[in-house]
Amino acid sequence: MTEKILLVDDEPTLLDTLAFNLRNVGYEVITAADGVTALEQARAESPDLIILDLMLPELDGLTVCRSLCQVSETPIMMLTARTGELDKIVGLESGADDYMTKPFSLGELQARIRALLRRAGPRRAGDELRSGDLTLNLVSRRAFLADEELVLSPKEFSLLAELMRHQGAVLSRDLLLTRVWGYDFFGDTRTVDVHVRWLREKIEVNPSEPVRIITVRGIGYRFEG
């Protein structure tokens, strides 16, 4: 599966050059030239990695980084022309996973990209998610429990897929709300609880004592399979 990179920089020449070279080595690349567009693209495209310039119009890179880290686990690499140690510390403490100072070589950039993607791990294996006798086909958006097809609403399917993609990890209600319902959804976290209850009725042997979707008190949910 081709990894998708969101590349954000307000220097047109650098943006085009990096995008061209990353596509040449096999990545799918989408671009943005300002902070607001970067947030919109991150939501719409669900990239595997974000390369984010520090100095951006509309919203600066630190603000974008903080906003993304509140709702996403996508690795972020910061780019900047600033060389001070304090700038690097601020960038990393804002949630960035790596930090590169301009100018840099394409070889080093590609090596750091590979390292970040390895640490993040695959987002899915092929077109299916499997856990025991539960299978989700991400292309047809059909779900099966053993040999029986489940009737899931679009949001139920998306919520279950998000939980299964991160099996064993605790996902907060706010994170699930943003990833499944979107940044601009105006409901509250009880929406997640309701949909989890509906999912349990369909995939748990005993919905009142779930073994697949586990509640982590005060935080959210963990999928155990």
Image (tube, rainbow, N blue to C red):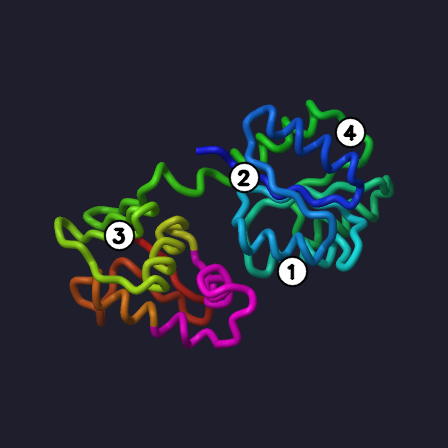
In this view, 95 is above or below 154: above
- Badge 3 density bin: few <14, some 14–19, many ≥20, Cα 10 Å: some
Q: Which mark is residue 67?
A: 1
Provide the residue designation for mark 3.
142
Farthest-out residue, left: 147
Does dot 3 land on a helix, a strand or a loop? strand
**Residues tagged 3 and 4 counted as in contact (Cβ below 8 A):** no
Residue to which mark 4 is pinned: 104
Q: Quadrant of the N terminus?
A: top left
Q: Residue at x 47, y 38 (%)?
A: 121
The label number, if any, that marks residue 28 in the structure image: none
In magenta, the rendered stretch is 170-194
State how far apart marks 1 and 2 are (Cα). Answer: 20 Å
- Which of disc 4 and disc 3 is earlier in sequence? 4
Mark seen at residue 4 = 2
Up-down relation of residue 28 to residue 37 (above or below): above
Looking at the image, tell me whether mark 1 or mark 2 is earlier in sequence order.
2
* Left or right: where 121 falls relative to 18: left
Among the two numbered marks 2 and 4 on one chain, the one whose residue lies closer to the N terminus: 2
Q: Residue at x 35, y 37 (%)?
A: 126
